[in-house]
Image: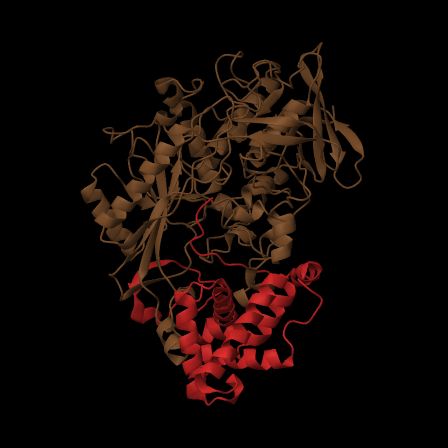
Chain colours: A brown, B red
Amino acid sequence: MDFDAIVVGSGISGGWVAKELCERGLKTLVIERGRHVNHRTDYLDFSAPWEVPNRGKVPEAEVAEHYAVQSQCEAFNSATKQWWVRDSEHPYSTPVDRPYHWIRGYHLGGRSITWSRQAYRMSDYDFGANQQDGNGIDWPIRYADLSPWYDRVERFAGISGATEGLEQLPDGQFLAPMELNCLESAFKKKIEQEFPTRRVTAGRCAHLTEPTAEHIALGRGPCQLRSNCERGCGYGAYFSSLSATLPAAQKTGNLTVVTDAIVERLDYDHAKRRISGVRVTDANTKQGRSYQARVVFVCASTIGTAQILLASQSESFPRGLANRSDAVGRHLMDHLVGFGASGTHPGFLDRYYYGRRPTGFYLPRYINLTEKGDVDFLRGYGFQGYAGRSSWERAEKEAGVGAELKERLRTPGPWGMKLVGFGEMLPRADNRVTLHATRKDRWGLPLVHVDCTHGENERRLADRASRDAVQMLVSAGFENVVPLGELKAPGNSVHEVGTARMGRDPATSVLNAHNQAHDVQNLFITDGSCMTSSGSVNPALTYMALSARAANYAADRLASGEM
Amino acid sequence: MLLGAVLLVGGGAALTRFNRKAEVFAGSSRRAFNAEQFALLEQVCEVIIPTTDTPGAIVAGVPDFMRQILEEWGTEHSRAEIEGVLEAVEKLAWSRFGAAFLELVPDRRLDVIKVFDGERLAAKDPAYAKFKHLVLVGYYQSEIGATRELRYELVPGAWRSCVPLSEIGRASAV
């Protein structure tokens, strides 16, 4: 054996698995398909606006030719361009009339560099939702199974937030919150008066407001309020694989990382009923090679993991590895986004703020929980939001030139607020990732084909969320209140989950309660693909907790000789 | 992903690399703006953002920025739109005052640009929207615009959630 463990993928999930396994004394290989990244020195976070290439603009022709999908992400610009794949080099297919936006980056650390850093626990309302309304299958775990692991990952990652005592949004091990600004505080007061079961709380985010000794020992420092986060943070102030988990794994002396290695397939030993090898193609030379280990974790992202499993066909698994259930690739979900509301507020003109806070506020789910009447859909939504004062950009739409314009723009513009809905999507078997029948990528691997649509429940949910957002802003005294827009095509929230779901029954699910494949005992999957439902909160913290839990379970089984 | 509360961008370290790539995608190898157009561009920018107690558009490098952005970022279509705006300004100068824009005294230049700005924004003209956007970005995201006209700190270092505007002074450039 080359290694005790192999982890495919170095993003949020893979980083966590590597850290836990290394700390348990296992010689661990992390395989990353993208290039190597140096924490700090490869980041572009210390440039002022006037030092940034073309003030952030990526050439129009380059966007059209290479980044048509990736540029849909708001964080895409000339200083973050290195964190997104070129669509032209990494194609995938969809039905012509059913777009899916697969937003991703191939490099060490994956999307842990560009994530929005919002970190929320799922609750038993989420873990019990499938069972309660009969969509999808039941999760094989409940909140109590994950709660200690949420504690563990929150302490290590460093999550800033406020304690609220809400059942639907369990509290955690928080560092000091990033306070609401003047208008947000007023909004909170008004909303909590008008709608007694709704709550507005500081956005819970993976930023060090008060670094602990453990954070500092890893070279991480406190957040400097720059909001250059998506460029990478040289202070290591937000959690990423590069700032936190991989350095911790490295410290053990048990970590090996290979980059530019694309996993082509996992080889399966029929007699031993185990994965016998991980075959990779060198991204640059296209040479093949293989690695062996006692246990393999696949954390290649929801669509990437499905692709690897489907491509790993064998006599035992003609439909793809660990796919006796035919659930691999199915039940693709992504949080519903595109709707919400914005408005301006006439007050607080003598108030402002200092610093560029990298989070906003969160208004957790109430619909179908504490507010149940008159609802024509299942599940629910939460809102992320923020308030701020406009600056010079407002002049793009306001008439005015000359000295008068300059003078006017010296003072901040009126306050505005945005409420952005994030809704739960139901698991449906025909929302699906498959391998393209004929088209292949430049490495000769079959292209991913994504076929994913929203249904009536999703549309009704989005409509209601939009109406609620408008109503809340109006009731809190906002003016010029308008809905944000329509439900966007799936993929746009970059919260894709579900393609190798956990469950109790091997006939309907891929993974058991420990993220272990029902049919292949040395295979674990802990990225978003394991999610049995999507819930309505940002999923990354749950991947972290599941990854840490599964890694320790696997280490226990290896230690006891049961695997 | 979180909504982009404040989207800002940066990266001196890789300037060379990005610029090299940018060249490949320049809309055209042709220089943006001939000498006449550039002279007009300079004065139009300066009328929109004049020198007052702080430097105006020319000193802040806005016309040079416009040229660079059209050479490195814009497609032929964007170039044509921006050049079209300059032509239309020139036409309006002739129709209002019977002379070229550059021949007009400062008050008349301001009059032309004020009328033009009002009309084009009301008509939601995409070419002018792009033009004004570039002038504003060129100025307020320049070092002069961000730090002398408005306020900008690369490393704020603290979050003060609710403070009197009088303590902060001017609007933040980012």
In the image, A487 versus B99, the foreground residue is: B99
Q: Quadrant of residue A403?
A: bottom left
Indicate the position of residue A86 as horizontal and vertical percent values.
65, 46
Residue pictured at 68% horizontal, 58% vertical: B25
Quarter of the figure that contains the N terminus of chain A: top right
Q: Taking B19 as reference, is A552 above or below it?
A: above
In the image, A399 versus B144, the foreground residue is: A399
Q: Residue furthest left?
A: A193
Residue A414 visible in the picture: yes
Q: Quadrant of residue A120?
A: top left
In the image, A7 versus A381, the foreground residue is: A381
Indicate the position of residue A76 as horizontal and vertical percent values.
55, 51
Answer with left or right where residue A75 lies relative to residue B20: left
Q: Taking A319 as reference, is A54 above or below it?
A: below
Quarter of the figure that contains the C terminus of chain A: top right
Q: Taking B23 as reference, is A513 above or below it?
A: above
Q: How many marks?
A: 0
Residue pictured at 65% horizontal, 47% vertical: A37
Q: Quadrant of residue B27?
A: bottom right
Indicate the position of residue A45 as horizontal and vertical percent values.
55, 58
Answer with left or right where residue A395 lies relative to residue A479: right
Residue A38 visible in the picture: no
Indicate the position of residue B80 as horizontal and vertical percent values.
59, 67
